[in-house]
């Protein structure tokens, strides 16, 4: 009797384990470095250096000349950016819909009310919508900061490496980008030029 009493729970546990469905294998997330070139195609930003900062909750983009206005009863904002983040003389005007105004603390702990917009972020060949705040970052090394809310569920960050994702595609496929700039060759014109060159040599 004692033996059956001891063995019964183990047998039940084994039977329950066999009934449990097997957990689906998790797809490994892509890895990005602590800084990457990212794109914002809806804002016309092809590639800008950004710090991937999991210590920051909110993403931020350096912007100035902020001009809020109303469009179809919705809050919008005009602003200016440096589209490549390195040339201060190169500027670009942008438009975006405002989704919120929030108090955000910067790295020094200073709190400010910022406009929050929703736009599309591109890292490598992956695009997805994020919320990003507009603020003055001229005193920072990077014009753009991508916080943990934006990368959560998308990437794993390797703090010891950088620029792992490559240049952002912004929705364009690599083959199209490569063949787009290749000029079409005229075979007849090429043959005539080669024939004329051979005649001169003779």
Image (cartoon, grey):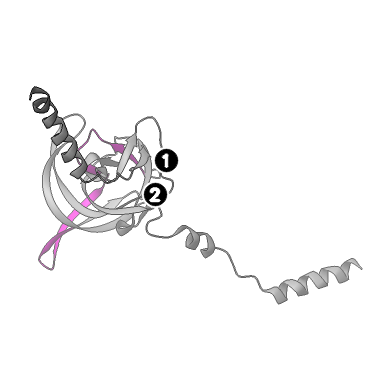
- What is the residue that sits farthest to the front in this orientation? 1
Disc 1 marks which residue? Answer: 164
Q: Which residues are magenta?
A: 48-76
Q: Secondary structure at mark 2?
A: loop
- What is the residue that sits farthest to the right in this orientation? 202
Badge count: 2
- The magenta stretch spans residue 60: yes
- Say which quarter of the image contains residue 93: bottom left
Q: Principal SS element in the magenta part?
A: strand
Q: Which of 87 and 177 lies nearest the eye of the viewer?
A: 177
User: Is residue 138 toward the left or the right of residue 5 in the image?
Assistant: right
Percent x, y for residue 196? 82, 72
In the depicted structure, whether residue 172 falls above or below residue 8 = below
- Say which quarter of the image contains residue 111: top left
The reply to whether discs 2 and 1 touch (Cβ–Cβ < 8 Å) is no
Label ID, residue 124: 2
Q: How packed is label 2: few (under 14 Cα within 10 Å), some, or many (20 or more)? A: many
Question: Where's the C terminus, which quadrant?
Answer: bottom right
Percent x, y for residue 81? 30, 50
- The magenta stretch spans residue 142: no
Q: Which of 181 and 129 lies nearest the eye of the viewer?
A: 129
* Residue under the point 16% across and 49% down: 115
User: Is residue 35 toward the left or the right of residue 55 in the image?
Assistant: right
* Residue under the point 52% across and 59% down: 178
- Say which quarter of the image contains residue 151: top left
* Residue under the point 33% across and 55% down: 92
Percent x, y for residue 142? 33, 38
Q: Secondary structure at mark 1?
A: loop
Q: Which of 104 and 169 lies nearest the eye of the viewer?
A: 169
In the depicted structure, whether residue 107 falls above or below residue 173 = above
């Amino acid at each position: 009797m004692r033996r059956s009493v001891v063995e019964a729970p183990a047998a039940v546990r084994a039977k329950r384990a066999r009934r449990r469905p097997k957990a689906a294998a998790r797809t490994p997330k892509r890895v990005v470095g602590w800084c990457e070139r990212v794109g914002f195609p809806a804002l016309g930003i092809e590639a800008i250096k950004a710090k991937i900062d999991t210590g920051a909750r909110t993403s931020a983009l350096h912007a100035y000349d902020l001009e809020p206005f109303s469009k179809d009863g919705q809050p919008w904002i005009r602003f200016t950016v440096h589209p490549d983040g390195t040339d201060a003389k190169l500027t670009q005007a942008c438009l975006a819909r405002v989704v919120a105004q929030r108090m955000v603390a910067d790295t020094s702990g200073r709190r400010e009310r910022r406009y929050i917009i929703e736009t599309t972020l591109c890292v490598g060949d992956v695009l997805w919508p994020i919320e990003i705040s507009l603020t003055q970052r001229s005193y920072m090394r990077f014009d753009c900061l991508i916080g943990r809310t934006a990368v959560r569920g998308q990437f794993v960050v390797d703090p010891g490496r950088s620029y792992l994702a490559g240049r952002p595609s912004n929705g364009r496929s690599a083959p199209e980008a490569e063949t787009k700039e290749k000029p079409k060759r005229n075979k007849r014109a090429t043959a005539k030029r080669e024939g004329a060159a051979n005649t001169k040599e003779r």
